[in-house]
Image (cartoon, rainbow, N blue to C red):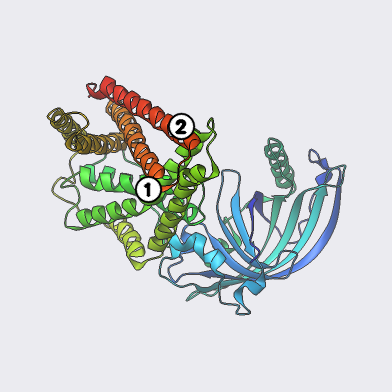
Protein backbone atom coordinates (compact mmCIF):
# COMPACT_ATOMS: atom_id res chain seq x y z
CA UNK A 1 0.00 0.00 0.00
CA UNK A 2 1.38 3.43 -0.99
CA UNK A 3 1.62 5.66 2.09
CA UNK A 4 2.75 9.25 1.63
CA UNK A 5 3.70 11.42 4.60
CA UNK A 6 4.72 15.07 4.66
CA UNK A 7 4.86 18.09 6.94
CA UNK A 8 2.15 20.63 6.20
CA UNK A 9 3.25 24.21 6.80
CA UNK A 10 0.46 26.70 6.20
CA UNK A 11 -1.29 29.87 7.24
CA UNK A 12 -5.08 29.95 7.55
CA UNK A 13 -7.33 33.02 7.47
CA UNK A 14 -11.00 33.94 7.39
CA UNK A 15 -12.03 36.27 4.55
CA UNK A 16 -15.16 37.83 3.15
CA UNK A 17 -16.82 35.90 0.33
CA UNK A 18 -15.41 36.87 -3.06
CA UNK A 19 -12.43 38.75 -1.57
CA UNK A 20 -9.86 39.16 -4.41
CA UNK A 21 -6.41 37.74 -3.67
CA UNK A 22 -3.38 40.05 -3.74
CA UNK A 23 -0.43 39.89 -6.12
CA UNK A 24 1.81 37.08 -4.78
CA UNK A 25 4.77 38.15 -6.93
CA UNK A 26 5.49 40.82 -4.29
CA UNK A 27 6.56 38.02 -1.93
CA UNK A 28 10.30 37.26 -1.58
CA UNK A 29 11.46 34.68 -4.11
CA UNK A 30 8.18 34.61 -6.04
CA UNK A 31 8.64 35.51 -9.71
CA UNK A 32 5.42 34.28 -11.35
CA UNK A 33 2.00 32.92 -10.49
CA UNK A 34 -0.31 30.51 -12.30
CA UNK A 35 -3.97 29.90 -11.88
CA UNK A 36 -6.50 30.01 -10.54
CA UNK A 37 -6.97 26.24 -10.76
CA UNK A 38 -10.48 25.28 -9.67
CA UNK A 39 -11.14 22.09 -7.71
CA UNK A 40 -14.30 20.70 -6.12
CA UNK A 41 -13.58 18.70 -2.96
CA UNK A 42 -16.01 16.49 -1.04
CA UNK A 43 -14.77 15.24 2.31
CA UNK A 44 -16.21 13.08 5.07
CA UNK A 45 -14.54 13.42 8.46
CA UNK A 46 -14.37 10.56 10.96
CA UNK A 47 -14.05 10.46 14.73
CA UNK A 48 -15.29 8.59 17.79
CA UNK A 49 -18.53 9.33 19.57
CA UNK A 50 -16.57 11.36 22.13
CA UNK A 51 -14.52 13.17 19.47
CA UNK A 52 -11.25 11.74 20.77
CA UNK A 53 -9.35 12.66 17.61
CA UNK A 54 -10.58 16.25 17.42
CA UNK A 55 -9.81 16.58 21.12
CA UNK A 56 -6.15 15.93 20.27
CA UNK A 57 -6.10 18.20 17.20
CA UNK A 58 -6.20 15.21 14.84
CA UNK A 59 -8.32 15.09 11.68
CA UNK A 60 -9.16 11.94 9.73
CA UNK A 61 -11.01 12.29 6.44
CA UNK A 62 -11.91 10.67 3.13
CA UNK A 63 -11.84 13.20 0.33
CA UNK A 64 -12.77 12.93 -3.35
CA UNK A 65 -11.91 15.44 -6.01
CA UNK A 66 -8.76 17.47 -6.44
CA UNK A 67 -5.16 16.50 -7.13
CA UNK A 68 -4.67 14.68 -3.80
CA UNK A 69 -7.94 12.84 -3.30
CA UNK A 70 -7.72 9.93 -0.90
CA UNK A 71 -7.69 9.19 2.82
CA UNK A 72 -5.86 11.83 4.89
CA UNK A 73 -4.70 11.85 8.52
CA UNK A 74 -3.40 15.12 9.97
CA UNK A 75 -1.66 15.22 13.35
CA UNK A 76 0.27 17.80 15.36
CA UNK A 77 3.84 17.44 14.15
CA UNK A 78 6.95 19.56 14.40
CA UNK A 79 7.09 23.16 15.54
CA UNK A 80 6.95 24.13 11.87
CA UNK A 81 3.68 22.42 10.96
CA UNK A 82 1.39 19.41 11.03
CA UNK A 83 2.17 15.91 9.83
CA UNK A 84 -0.11 14.69 7.05
CA UNK A 85 -0.30 11.03 6.02
CA UNK A 86 -2.14 10.01 2.83
CA UNK A 87 -3.24 6.70 1.34
CA UNK A 88 -5.27 6.13 -1.87
CA UNK A 89 -9.05 5.81 -1.86
CA UNK A 90 -8.78 2.15 -2.85
CA UNK A 91 -7.04 1.42 0.46
CA UNK A 92 -10.50 0.98 1.99
CA UNK A 93 -11.45 -1.72 -0.51
CA UNK A 94 -14.35 0.26 -1.92
CA UNK A 95 -16.02 0.82 1.48
CA UNK A 96 -16.29 4.56 2.05
CA UNK A 97 -16.59 4.04 5.81
CA UNK A 98 -13.75 1.53 6.24
CA UNK A 99 -10.82 3.62 7.44
CA UNK A 100 -7.52 2.07 6.28
CA UNK A 101 -5.35 0.49 8.98
CA UNK A 102 -2.42 2.67 7.86
CA UNK A 103 -4.29 5.68 9.25
CA UNK A 104 -5.76 4.01 12.32
CA UNK A 105 -2.47 2.73 13.75
CA UNK A 106 -0.81 6.14 14.29
CA UNK A 107 -3.81 7.32 16.36
CA UNK A 108 -4.67 4.08 18.12
CA UNK A 109 -3.51 5.64 21.38
CA UNK A 110 -6.44 8.07 21.08
CA UNK A 111 -9.01 5.68 19.61
CA UNK A 112 -8.13 2.70 21.81
CA UNK A 113 -10.96 0.18 21.52
CA UNK A 114 -13.45 2.75 20.28
CA UNK A 115 -14.73 2.83 16.70
CA UNK A 116 -14.95 5.77 14.33
CA UNK A 117 -17.89 7.02 12.27
CA UNK A 118 -18.64 10.09 10.12
CA UNK A 119 -18.94 13.29 12.16
CA UNK A 120 -18.95 15.96 9.42
CA UNK A 121 -19.38 16.39 5.67
CA UNK A 122 -17.52 19.31 4.08
CA UNK A 123 -17.69 20.50 0.48
CA UNK A 124 -15.10 22.98 -0.75
CA UNK A 125 -14.93 24.99 -3.96
CA UNK A 126 -11.22 25.75 -4.14
CA UNK A 127 -9.34 28.20 -6.36
CA UNK A 128 -5.60 27.54 -6.30
CA UNK A 129 -3.02 30.16 -7.22
CA UNK A 130 0.50 28.78 -7.56
CA UNK A 131 3.56 30.85 -6.62
CA UNK A 132 6.77 29.96 -8.49
CA UNK A 133 10.35 31.18 -8.45
CA UNK A 134 12.35 32.35 -11.48
CA UNK A 135 13.20 28.75 -12.39
CA UNK A 136 9.56 27.72 -12.36
CA UNK A 137 9.85 25.78 -9.09
CA UNK A 138 6.58 25.71 -7.16
CA UNK A 139 7.16 27.44 -3.82
CA UNK A 140 3.70 27.79 -2.34
CA UNK A 141 -0.01 27.79 -3.12
CA UNK A 142 -2.78 30.11 -2.04
CA UNK A 143 -6.14 28.32 -1.79
CA UNK A 144 -9.22 30.52 -1.83
CA UNK A 145 -11.93 28.25 -0.43
CA UNK A 146 -15.70 28.56 -0.32
CA UNK A 147 -16.67 26.00 2.33
CA UNK A 148 -20.05 24.37 2.90
CA UNK A 149 -19.99 22.22 6.04
CA UNK A 150 -22.55 20.07 7.80
CA UNK A 151 -22.05 18.57 11.24
CA UNK A 152 -23.28 14.96 11.46
CA UNK A 153 -23.31 15.02 15.26
CA UNK A 154 -26.61 15.01 17.17
CA UNK A 155 -28.05 18.50 16.90
CA UNK A 156 -25.43 19.49 14.32
CA UNK A 157 -26.06 22.31 11.89
CA UNK A 158 -24.73 23.58 8.56
CA UNK A 159 -22.42 26.52 7.87
CA UNK A 160 -20.97 28.37 4.88
CA UNK A 161 -17.81 30.48 5.02
CA UNK A 162 -14.81 31.62 2.99
CA UNK A 163 -11.16 31.23 3.91
CA UNK A 164 -7.65 31.46 2.53
CA UNK A 165 -4.90 28.89 3.08
CA UNK A 166 -1.31 29.76 2.17
CA UNK A 167 0.75 26.55 2.13
CA UNK A 168 4.44 26.02 1.47
CA UNK A 169 5.21 23.38 -1.15
CA UNK A 170 8.99 23.54 -1.69
CA UNK A 171 11.51 22.25 0.86
CA UNK A 172 12.59 25.28 2.87
CA UNK A 173 15.18 25.79 5.55
CA UNK A 174 15.73 29.24 6.99
CA UNK A 175 13.82 30.96 4.17
CA UNK A 176 10.48 29.42 5.21
CA UNK A 177 9.97 31.85 8.06
CA UNK A 178 10.65 34.86 5.86
CA UNK A 179 8.20 33.74 3.18
CA UNK A 180 5.46 32.92 5.71
CA UNK A 181 5.95 36.22 7.55
CA UNK A 182 5.78 38.19 4.31
CA UNK A 183 2.73 36.23 3.15
CA UNK A 184 0.89 36.93 6.40
CA UNK A 185 1.58 40.64 6.12
CA UNK A 186 0.44 40.70 2.49
CA UNK A 187 -2.73 38.68 3.05
CA UNK A 188 -3.82 40.62 6.12
CA UNK A 189 -3.37 43.86 4.18
CA UNK A 190 -5.67 42.36 1.54
CA UNK A 191 -8.46 41.70 4.03
CA UNK A 192 -7.54 38.38 5.66
CA UNK A 193 -8.46 37.93 9.31
CA UNK A 194 -7.28 35.53 12.00
CA UNK A 195 -9.04 32.20 11.46
CA UNK A 196 -11.83 31.54 13.93
CA UNK A 197 -10.93 27.82 14.04
CA UNK A 198 -7.76 25.80 13.58
CA UNK A 199 -9.33 23.62 10.88
CA UNK A 200 -12.45 23.22 8.77
CA UNK A 201 -13.54 20.33 10.96
CA UNK A 202 -13.14 22.33 14.16
CA UNK A 203 -15.38 25.04 12.75
CA UNK A 204 -17.93 22.52 11.50
CA UNK A 205 -18.40 20.59 14.77
CA UNK A 206 -17.61 23.28 17.35
CA UNK A 207 -15.87 22.72 20.68
CA UNK A 208 -14.76 19.27 21.82
CA UNK A 209 -15.12 17.67 25.26
CA UNK A 210 -11.54 18.61 26.20
CA UNK A 211 -10.04 15.46 27.69
CA UNK A 212 -6.54 16.87 27.64
CA UNK A 213 -5.25 18.48 30.80
CA UNK A 214 -3.26 21.60 29.91
CA UNK A 215 -2.57 22.31 33.54
CA UNK A 216 -0.42 24.94 35.20
CA UNK A 217 0.15 25.17 38.91
CA UNK A 218 -1.27 28.07 40.93
CA UNK A 219 1.01 30.23 43.06
CA UNK A 220 0.50 28.10 46.15
CA UNK A 221 -0.31 24.62 44.88
CA UNK A 222 -1.41 21.71 47.01
CA UNK A 223 0.15 18.26 46.93
CA UNK A 224 -2.83 17.02 44.92
CA UNK A 225 -2.37 19.75 42.31
CA UNK A 226 1.33 18.92 42.01
CA UNK A 227 0.74 15.18 41.65
CA UNK A 228 -2.04 15.57 39.09
CA UNK A 229 0.04 18.06 37.08
CA UNK A 230 3.04 15.72 37.05
CA UNK A 231 0.90 12.72 36.09
CA UNK A 232 -0.68 14.70 33.27
CA UNK A 233 2.74 15.78 32.01
CA UNK A 234 4.09 12.24 31.84
CA UNK A 235 0.80 10.85 30.51
CA UNK A 236 1.08 13.33 27.65
CA UNK A 237 4.64 12.15 26.97
CA UNK A 238 3.55 8.52 26.89
CA UNK A 239 0.72 9.33 24.49
CA UNK A 240 3.05 11.39 22.30
CA UNK A 241 5.60 8.56 21.98
CA UNK A 242 3.04 5.80 21.41
CA UNK A 243 2.70 6.41 17.63
CA UNK A 244 6.48 6.63 17.29
CA UNK A 245 6.90 3.22 18.95
CA UNK A 246 4.33 1.74 16.58
CA UNK A 247 6.26 3.23 13.65
CA UNK A 248 9.54 1.85 15.07
CA UNK A 249 11.06 5.33 15.20
CA UNK A 250 14.53 5.86 16.60
CA UNK A 251 14.69 6.09 20.42
CA UNK A 252 10.89 5.87 20.70
CA UNK A 253 10.83 2.73 22.87
CA UNK A 254 13.29 4.33 25.27
CA UNK A 255 11.33 7.57 25.59
CA UNK A 256 7.99 5.82 26.10
CA UNK A 257 9.56 3.58 28.73
CA UNK A 258 10.91 6.65 30.57
CA UNK A 259 7.45 8.24 30.57
CA UNK A 260 5.99 5.01 31.93
CA UNK A 261 8.55 4.86 34.73
CA UNK A 262 8.03 8.48 35.64
CA UNK A 263 4.29 7.90 35.93
CA UNK A 264 4.91 5.01 38.29
CA UNK A 265 7.37 7.05 40.35
CA UNK A 266 4.89 9.87 40.88
CA UNK A 267 2.14 7.42 41.85
CA UNK A 268 4.40 5.79 44.46
CA UNK A 269 6.29 8.80 45.81
CA UNK A 270 3.41 10.77 47.30
CA UNK A 271 1.51 8.47 49.69
CA UNK A 272 -1.80 9.73 50.98
CA UNK A 273 -2.23 12.36 48.28
CA UNK A 274 -4.48 10.13 46.17
CA UNK A 275 -6.95 7.88 47.95
CA UNK A 276 -8.08 4.34 47.26
CA UNK A 277 -6.44 1.34 45.59
CA UNK A 278 -6.26 2.89 42.12
CA UNK A 279 -2.82 4.56 42.42
CA UNK A 280 -1.16 1.29 43.47
CA UNK A 281 -2.98 -0.67 40.77
CA UNK A 282 -1.97 1.81 38.10
CA UNK A 283 1.60 1.76 39.39
CA UNK A 284 1.70 -2.01 38.98
CA UNK A 285 0.31 -1.72 35.46
CA UNK A 286 2.90 0.86 34.46
CA UNK A 287 5.61 -1.35 35.94
CA UNK A 288 4.46 -4.20 33.72
CA UNK A 289 4.35 -1.94 30.66
CA UNK A 290 7.88 -0.70 31.37
CA UNK A 291 9.09 -4.30 31.61
CA UNK A 292 7.56 -5.15 28.24
CA UNK A 293 9.19 -2.12 26.62
CA UNK A 294 12.44 -2.96 28.39
CA UNK A 295 13.04 -6.12 26.37
CA UNK A 296 13.29 -4.16 23.13
CA UNK A 297 15.14 -1.27 24.76
CA UNK A 298 17.84 -3.49 26.30
CA UNK A 299 18.44 -5.21 22.96
CA UNK A 300 18.57 -1.82 21.21
CA UNK A 301 21.27 -0.64 23.64
CA UNK A 302 23.33 -3.81 23.20
CA UNK A 303 23.10 -3.73 19.40
CA UNK A 304 24.36 -0.16 19.34
CA UNK A 305 27.06 -1.07 21.82
CA UNK A 306 28.43 -3.87 19.65
CA UNK A 307 28.31 -1.74 16.53
CA UNK A 308 30.53 0.77 18.31
CA UNK A 309 32.84 -1.87 19.81
CA UNK A 310 33.36 -3.63 16.48
CA UNK A 311 34.00 -0.44 14.53
CA UNK A 312 37.77 -0.63 15.10
CA UNK A 313 37.95 -4.45 14.95
CA UNK A 314 38.02 -6.98 12.11
CA UNK A 315 35.39 -9.56 13.08
CA UNK A 316 34.18 -12.31 10.78
CA UNK A 317 30.65 -12.10 9.40
CA UNK A 318 29.68 -14.91 11.77
CA UNK A 319 30.90 -13.02 14.84
CA UNK A 320 29.30 -9.75 13.78
CA UNK A 321 26.03 -11.60 13.24
CA UNK A 322 26.30 -13.31 16.64
CA UNK A 323 26.69 -9.93 18.33
CA UNK A 324 24.94 -7.18 16.35
CA UNK A 325 22.40 -9.09 14.27
CA UNK A 326 21.36 -11.30 17.19
CA UNK A 327 20.56 -8.19 19.25
CA UNK A 328 18.72 -6.63 16.29
CA UNK A 329 16.56 -9.73 16.02
CA UNK A 330 15.98 -9.68 19.77
CA UNK A 331 14.98 -6.02 19.48
CA UNK A 332 12.55 -6.77 16.67
CA UNK A 333 10.91 -9.58 18.65
CA UNK A 334 10.66 -7.31 21.69
CA UNK A 335 9.24 -4.48 19.61
CA UNK A 336 6.57 -6.74 18.10
CA UNK A 337 5.63 -7.92 21.60
CA UNK A 338 5.43 -4.31 22.79
CA UNK A 339 3.17 -3.26 19.91
CA UNK A 340 0.95 -6.29 20.52
CA UNK A 341 0.65 -5.22 24.16
CA UNK A 342 -0.15 -1.68 23.01
CA UNK A 343 -3.05 -3.04 20.96
CA UNK A 344 -4.51 -4.96 23.89
CA UNK A 345 -7.59 -4.13 25.92
CA UNK A 346 -5.37 -4.09 29.00
CA UNK A 347 -3.31 -1.22 27.61
CA UNK A 348 -6.34 0.74 26.48
CA UNK A 349 -7.94 0.21 29.90
CA UNK A 350 -4.78 1.56 31.53
CA UNK A 351 -4.89 4.69 29.38
CA UNK A 352 -8.58 5.19 30.14
CA UNK A 353 -7.88 4.75 33.85
CA UNK A 354 -5.10 7.34 34.03
CA UNK A 355 -7.29 9.75 32.05
CA UNK A 356 -10.15 9.19 34.48
CA UNK A 357 -7.86 9.74 37.46
CA UNK A 358 -6.66 13.05 36.04
CA UNK A 359 -10.18 14.26 35.35
CA UNK A 360 -11.58 13.22 38.74
CA UNK A 361 -8.86 12.34 41.27
CA UNK A 362 -9.90 11.04 44.67
CA UNK A 363 -8.17 13.20 47.29
CA UNK A 364 -6.36 11.41 50.10
CA UNK A 365 -5.60 12.59 53.62
CA UNK A 366 -2.50 14.49 52.44
CA UNK A 367 -4.11 16.06 49.38
CA UNK A 368 -4.19 19.58 50.82
CA UNK A 369 -0.64 19.56 52.13
CA UNK A 370 1.37 22.36 50.46
CA UNK A 371 3.08 21.03 47.35
CA UNK A 372 6.54 22.15 48.46
CA UNK A 373 6.19 20.30 51.76
CA UNK A 374 4.93 17.17 50.02
CA UNK A 375 7.81 17.29 47.54
CA UNK A 376 10.32 17.85 50.33
CA UNK A 377 9.04 14.81 52.19
CA UNK A 378 8.98 12.68 49.03
CA UNK A 379 12.56 13.61 48.11
CA UNK A 380 13.68 13.03 51.70
CA UNK A 381 12.08 9.57 51.80
CA UNK A 382 13.52 8.61 48.43
CA UNK A 383 16.98 9.86 49.38
CA UNK A 384 16.82 7.88 52.60
CA UNK A 385 15.94 4.79 50.58
CA UNK A 386 19.05 5.25 48.40
CA UNK A 387 21.30 5.74 51.43
CA UNK A 388 19.87 2.62 53.06
CA UNK A 389 20.53 0.60 49.90
CA UNK A 390 24.08 1.95 49.71
CA UNK A 391 24.72 0.98 53.31
CA UNK A 392 23.43 -2.52 52.66
CA UNK A 393 25.77 -2.76 49.66
CA UNK A 394 28.81 -2.38 51.94
CA UNK A 395 27.83 -5.57 53.78
CA UNK A 396 28.55 -7.71 50.71
CA UNK A 397 31.86 -8.62 49.16
CA UNK A 398 32.41 -6.92 45.81
CA UNK A 399 31.70 -9.18 42.85
CA UNK A 400 29.46 -11.63 44.70
CA UNK A 401 25.94 -12.29 43.39
CA UNK A 402 24.51 -10.57 46.49
CA UNK A 403 26.68 -7.49 45.89
CA UNK A 404 25.66 -7.34 42.23
CA UNK A 405 21.97 -7.65 43.09
CA UNK A 406 22.26 -4.90 45.69
CA UNK A 407 24.07 -2.68 43.21
CA UNK A 408 21.01 -2.99 40.95
CA UNK A 409 18.85 -1.96 43.91
CA UNK A 410 20.95 1.18 44.46
CA UNK A 411 20.63 2.07 40.78
CA UNK A 412 16.85 1.65 40.74
CA UNK A 413 16.38 3.65 43.92
CA UNK A 414 18.65 6.42 42.59
CA UNK A 415 16.55 6.54 39.45
CA UNK A 416 13.41 6.91 41.55
CA UNK A 417 15.03 9.70 43.57
CA UNK A 418 15.95 11.48 40.36
CA UNK A 419 12.41 11.27 39.00
CA UNK A 420 10.89 12.45 42.28
CA UNK A 421 13.33 15.35 42.64
CA UNK A 422 12.73 16.37 39.03
CA UNK A 423 9.02 16.59 39.79
CA UNK A 424 9.90 19.90 41.39
CA UNK A 425 10.67 21.38 37.98
CA UNK A 426 7.07 22.56 37.74
CA UNK A 427 7.43 24.37 41.08
CA UNK A 428 9.07 27.75 40.73
CA UNK A 429 12.20 27.96 42.86
CA UNK A 430 12.39 24.25 43.67
CA UNK A 431 15.39 23.42 45.84
CA UNK A 432 15.84 19.80 44.80
CA UNK A 433 17.85 20.16 41.60
CA UNK A 434 21.08 19.13 43.36
CA UNK A 435 19.53 15.84 44.52
CA UNK A 436 18.23 15.24 41.00
CA UNK A 437 21.65 15.81 39.42
CA UNK A 438 23.45 13.58 41.94
CA UNK A 439 20.89 10.82 41.58
CA UNK A 440 21.21 11.04 37.79
CA UNK A 441 25.00 10.66 38.03
CA UNK A 442 24.62 7.63 40.31
CA UNK A 443 22.03 6.11 37.98
CA UNK A 444 24.20 6.74 34.91
CA UNK A 445 27.36 5.29 36.44
CA UNK A 446 25.66 2.15 37.71
CA UNK A 447 23.74 1.82 34.46
CA UNK A 448 27.01 1.88 32.52
CA UNK A 449 28.49 -0.72 34.86
CA UNK A 450 25.44 -2.94 34.45
CA UNK A 451 25.53 -2.61 30.65
CA UNK A 452 29.20 -3.60 30.62
CA UNK A 453 28.50 -6.65 32.78
CA UNK A 454 25.64 -7.77 30.56
CA UNK A 455 27.84 -7.25 27.52
CA UNK A 456 30.54 -9.51 28.94
CA UNK A 457 27.94 -12.24 29.47
CA UNK A 458 26.80 -11.89 25.85
CA UNK A 459 30.40 -12.05 24.63
CA UNK A 460 30.98 -15.24 26.60
CA UNK A 461 27.79 -16.76 25.20
CA UNK A 462 28.83 -15.80 21.67
CA UNK A 463 32.16 -17.53 22.16
CA UNK A 464 30.37 -20.71 23.11
CA UNK A 465 27.65 -20.62 20.47
CA UNK A 466 29.70 -20.25 17.30
CA UNK A 467 32.76 -21.98 16.00
CA UNK A 468 35.25 -19.29 16.94
CA UNK A 469 38.37 -19.16 14.80
CA UNK A 470 41.58 -17.77 16.33
CA UNK A 471 41.05 -14.31 14.83
CA UNK A 472 37.55 -14.02 16.28
CA UNK A 473 38.74 -15.37 19.62
CA UNK A 474 41.29 -12.56 19.69
CA UNK A 475 38.55 -10.02 18.89
CA UNK A 476 36.29 -11.39 21.63
CA UNK A 477 39.15 -11.22 24.11
CA UNK A 478 39.83 -7.59 23.23
CA UNK A 479 36.14 -6.70 23.55
CA UNK A 480 35.88 -8.44 26.90
CA UNK A 481 38.92 -6.57 28.17
CA UNK A 482 37.48 -3.26 27.01
CA UNK A 483 34.18 -4.01 28.72
CA UNK A 484 36.00 -4.89 31.93
CA UNK A 485 37.78 -1.52 31.79
CA UNK A 486 34.46 0.27 31.15
CA UNK A 487 32.85 -1.59 34.05
CA UNK A 488 35.65 -0.59 36.43
CA UNK A 489 35.58 3.03 35.27
CA UNK A 490 31.83 3.18 35.81
CA UNK A 491 32.17 1.84 39.33
CA UNK A 492 34.87 4.44 39.99
CA UNK A 493 32.49 7.18 38.85
CA UNK A 494 29.86 5.79 41.18
CA UNK A 495 32.33 5.68 44.06
CA UNK A 496 33.26 9.32 43.44
CA UNK A 497 29.66 10.52 43.58
CA UNK A 498 28.07 8.00 45.96
CA UNK A 499 28.74 10.12 49.04
CA UNK A 500 27.31 13.34 47.57
CA UNK A 501 23.78 12.56 48.69
Q: Are marks 2 and 1 in contact (CB under 8 Å)?
A: no
Task: Determine the residue positioned at 23% across, 42% down.
Answer: 222
Q: Is residue 13 above or below residue 37?
A: above
- From the image, state whether disc 2 or disc 1 is nearer to you: 2
* Residue nearest the observer in this picture, 220 or 330: 330
| Quarter where residue 25 is shown | top right
Label 2, secondary structure: give it. Answer: helix
Task: Determine the residue positioned at 41% across, 32% down.
Answer: 477
Residue 210 showing in the rendered view: no
Residue 443: x %, y % from top left: 31, 33
Q: Is residue 470 above or below residue 62?
A: above
Image quarter of the N terminus: bottom right
Would you say 320 lies left or right of 28 here? left
Question: Can you identify the residue that label 1 sits on?
Answer: 257
Q: Is residue 1 above or below residue 480?
A: below
User: How many residues crowd around disc 2 within 10 Å: few (fewer than 14), some, or many (20 or more)?
Assistant: some
Task: Determine the residue positioned at 25% across, 52% down.
Answer: 283
Would you say 54 lies left or right of 435 here? right
Residue at far bottom of view:
95
Question: Can you identify the residue that label 2 sits on?
Answer: 474
Image quarter of the C terminus: top left
Label drawn at residue 297: none
Residue 329: x %, y % from top left: 47, 53
Ranked by sequence position, the earlier of labels 2 and 1 is 1
Residue 439: x %, y % from top left: 28, 30
Residue 393 showing in the rendered view: yes
* Residue nearest the observer in this picture, 341 or 332: 332
* Residue nearest the observer in this picture, 320 or 73: 320
Q: CA distance from mark 2 to mark 1?
A: 37 Å
Would you say 449 lies left or right of 402 here? right
| Quarter where residue 279 is shown | bottom left
Amino acid sequence: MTVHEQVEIELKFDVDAGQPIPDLTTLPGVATTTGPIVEHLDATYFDTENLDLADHAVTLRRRTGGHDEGWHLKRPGTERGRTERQVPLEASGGDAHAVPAELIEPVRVHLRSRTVAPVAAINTRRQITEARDSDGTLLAVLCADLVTARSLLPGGTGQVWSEWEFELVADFDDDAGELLESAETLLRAAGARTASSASKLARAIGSTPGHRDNRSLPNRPTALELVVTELARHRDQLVAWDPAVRADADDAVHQMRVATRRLRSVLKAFPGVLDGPEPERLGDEFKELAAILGVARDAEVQAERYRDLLEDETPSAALESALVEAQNQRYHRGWKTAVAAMNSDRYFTLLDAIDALLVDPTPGENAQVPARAALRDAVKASRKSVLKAQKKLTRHDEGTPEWTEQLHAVRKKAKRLRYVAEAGATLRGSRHSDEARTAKRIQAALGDANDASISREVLAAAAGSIGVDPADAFVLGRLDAREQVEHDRALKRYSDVAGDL
